[in-house]
Image: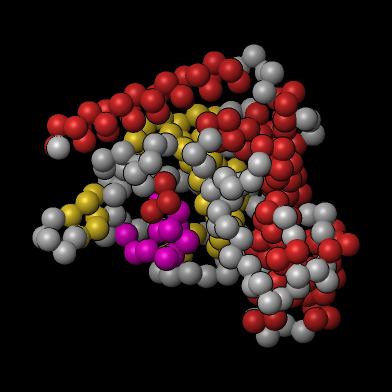
Amino acid sequence: MRFDLPNGTSVQALKDVSIDIQQGELLSVLGPSGCGKTTLLNIIAGFLAPTEGRISLKGHPVNGPDAERGMVFQQGALFEWMDVRANVSFGPRMAGRRESDWGSHVDHLLDVVGLKDFKEKAVYELSGGMQQRVALARCLANEPDVILMDEPLGALDALTREKMQSLVLKLWKETGKTIILITHSVEEALLLGERLIVMAPRPGRIHTEYRLPFADLGVNADLREVKKHPEFGPRREEILGMIWDMEEEIMGRTEESA
């Protein structure tokens, strides 16, 4: 992906990025600011068309947004004037489906994300964590094949974030959906990615890839206990060091250009 600038120069946001994601995988993507994580997610979502190369889902090309790929943003992007149930059911209603077709599914999702007793509440009455639960349920109500998550838990406090991480793992196992998660948190990437990709910047590219046991362990365990796993600490320090070195290199380049 190359962005051409008005002054005639260009920025190579991504270069030679190739990923084959299996159905039902939970992939976390991590890297320093400016490495192209969100750009990559926007290409997968169909919001951006790559300058070169292609993206396909189940053998057919991705040429734009589609209900087969659901997006959960850092901020819920909810409809403030609708109640919780109306937000969650928005997709099926816009698709012209009758409530008899989607009603029980929406109510089940509200129960799964712990919002059954809040379905008639206005969005503005909910906490940040509860709003992100609404966003997750709304995404799932469209029954996408792939769920794309762009820093969905970044604005939450530590305790709420941990609860939401557990919920993401629970939904992943229960639904069998393919999930691609962008995050700046090394711990979150380790906890939620059965497969983790570390990206490097300038141009954005895949630097290192890991297969990890922590997501599977976290489905049925307290995430604080998962962090005590003998492999967790060393992996965290290894990746933190890797990203720190990238940040140092970026700062060095910036100082030289100045």
Residue 12 locus on image (x, y percent): 23, 49
Location of residue 177 with respect to 234 vertically, above or below? below
Q: Is residue 64 visible?
A: yes
Colour scheme of this structure image?
Answer: secondary structure
Residue 223 locus on image (x, y percent): 72, 30
Q: In this view, which residue lies farthest toward the right?
A: 117
Residue 43 among those drawn in magenta: yes
Location of residue 249 with respect to 152 vertically, above or below? above
Left/right of residue 71 with respect to residue 96 in the rendered view:
left
| Location of the C terminus (image quadrant) | top left
Toward the viewer: 236 or 67?
A: 236
Toward the viewer: 152 or 229?
A: 152
Residue at x 34% of width, y 24% of height: 245
Residue 77 locus on image (x, y percent): 58, 65
Residue at x 72% of width, y 37% of height: 159
Q: Specify start and end residues of the magenta stretch as a single range.
A: 40-50
Q: Is residue 143 visible?
A: no
Residue 106 among those drawn in magenta: no
| Location of the N terminus (image quadrant) | bottom left
Residue at x 13% of width, y 55% of height: 9
Residue 124 locus on image (x, y percent): 70, 66
Residue at x 57% of width, y 57% of height: 75
